[in-house]
């Protein structure tokens, strides 16, 4: 059996539901603690510039409440750097961010922004945070990520998941091969490989079976599924599929 693969649970969309009414519930911290009990290895929360779901006080509460690692997703802005340096979460994942997008679309452009990103992540690394870059499965971006000092890359699986959902089997297989090839490439560069975006019960196994992928980060699907089965059951089933894929 391959090394145990970690599951990070993104609780952003619990906050999305809360913010739809502007009240205090459902509480994303309560969801994070439930995910922790259900077997999540880490919690991911994305503090967006427009605060459309997670808020600053949520990050503060998560840092105080969790006994498993917090993966703080953020854009590479001075405001977010300041917040990250204040809370010093276990891990920071730098993601691209556009106000008009509904969710993160595509990976970070590292190769053409190396100098700025290198300067941006250095203070985060200096205080002991593990810095990850959310990138496309592309060798150029992976080489650049290693060059600027990132310790982790999270490969964007959105294209594979879209092809899979559309029934475009040839395209899905091509994208899966690209993710697998880039996982090996990144691992050989000394980067720890994570993956995420759009993963569901139906498509997770092929990604989970890639030996170099040490962590999956899954959010929207698990929160949606929890409406019908409960968060603990959704996490348990996803964990089971991940374990089965690596046997």
Image (cartoon, rainbow, N blue to C red):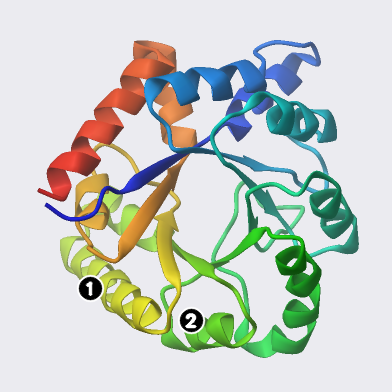
Residue 172 appears in which quarter of the rendering?
bottom left
Q: Residue at x 23, y 62 (%)?
A: 210
Does the rendering let one see residue 130? yes
Q: Residue at x 80, y 38 (%)?
A: 51
Q: Position of residue 238 (x, y in %)?
A: 29, 33
Q: Is residue 98 left or right of residue 40?
A: right
Mark with earlier residue (2, 1): 2
How busy is the neighbourhood of tag 1: few (under 14 within 10 Å), some, or many (20 plus)?
some
Q: Position of residue 113 (x, y in %)?
A: 71, 85
Does the rendering let one see residue 94? no
Q: Is residue 97 left or right of residue 207?
A: right
Q: Residue at x 36, y 76 (%)?
A: 187
Which SS class for mark 2?
helix
Q: Is residue 213 left or right of residue 122?
A: left
How busy is the neighbourhood of tag 2: few (under 14 within 10 Å), some, or many (20 plus)?
many
Q: Is residue 103 above or below residue 128?
A: above
| Along the line of sight, the residue nearer the viewer: 62 or 105 | 62
Q: Is residue 29 above or below residue 193?
A: above
Q: Position of residue 207 (x, y in %)?
A: 26, 56
Structural distance between the alpha carbons of marks 2 and 1: 16 Å
**Residue 142: which disc?**
2
| Along the line of sight, the residue nearer the viewer: 171 or 52 | 52
Q: Is residue 6 left or right of residue 44?
A: left
Mark whose residue sits in front, 2 or 1:
2
Which SS class for mark 1?
helix
| Along the line of sight, the residue nearer the viewer: 134 or 52 | 134
Q: Position of residue 15 (x, y in %)?
A: 67, 25
Q: Is residue 47 above or below residue 208?
A: above
Residue 74 appears in which quarter of the rendering?
bottom right
The residue where tag 1 is placed is 177
Q: Residue at x 86, y 48 (%)?
A: 86
């Amino acid at each position: 059996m391959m090394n145990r693969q970690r599951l990070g649970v993104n609780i952003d969309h619990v906050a999305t539901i809360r913010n739809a009414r502007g009240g205090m519930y459902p509480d994303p911290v309560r969801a994070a603690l439930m995910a922790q009990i259900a077997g999540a290895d880490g919690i991911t929360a994305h503090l967006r510039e427009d605060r459309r779901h997670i808020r600053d006080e949520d990050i503060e509460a998560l840092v105080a409440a969790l006994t498993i690692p917090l993966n703080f997703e953020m854009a590479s802005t001075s405001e977010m750097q300041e917040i990250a340096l204040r809370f010093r979460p276990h891990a920071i994942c730098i993601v691209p961010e556009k106000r008009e997008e509904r969710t993160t679309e595509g990976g970070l452009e590292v190769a053409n922004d190396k100098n700025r990103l290198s300067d941006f992540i250095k203070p985060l690394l200096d205080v002991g945070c593990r810095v990850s870059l959310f990138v496309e499965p592309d060798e150029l971006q992976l080489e650049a990520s290693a060059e600027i000092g990132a310790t982790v890359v999270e490969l964007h699986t959105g294209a594979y998941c879209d092809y899979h959902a559309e029934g475009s089997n040839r395209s899905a297989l091509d994208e899966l091969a690209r993710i697998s090839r880039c996982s090996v490439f990144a691992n050989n560069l000394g980067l720890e490989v994570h993956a995420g975006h759009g993963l569901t019960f139906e498509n997770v196994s092929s990604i989970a079976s890639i030996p170099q992928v040490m962590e999956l980060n899954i959010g929207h699907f698990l929160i949606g599924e929890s409406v019908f089965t409960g968060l603990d059951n959704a996490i348990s089933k996803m964990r089971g599929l991940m374990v089965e894929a690596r046997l």
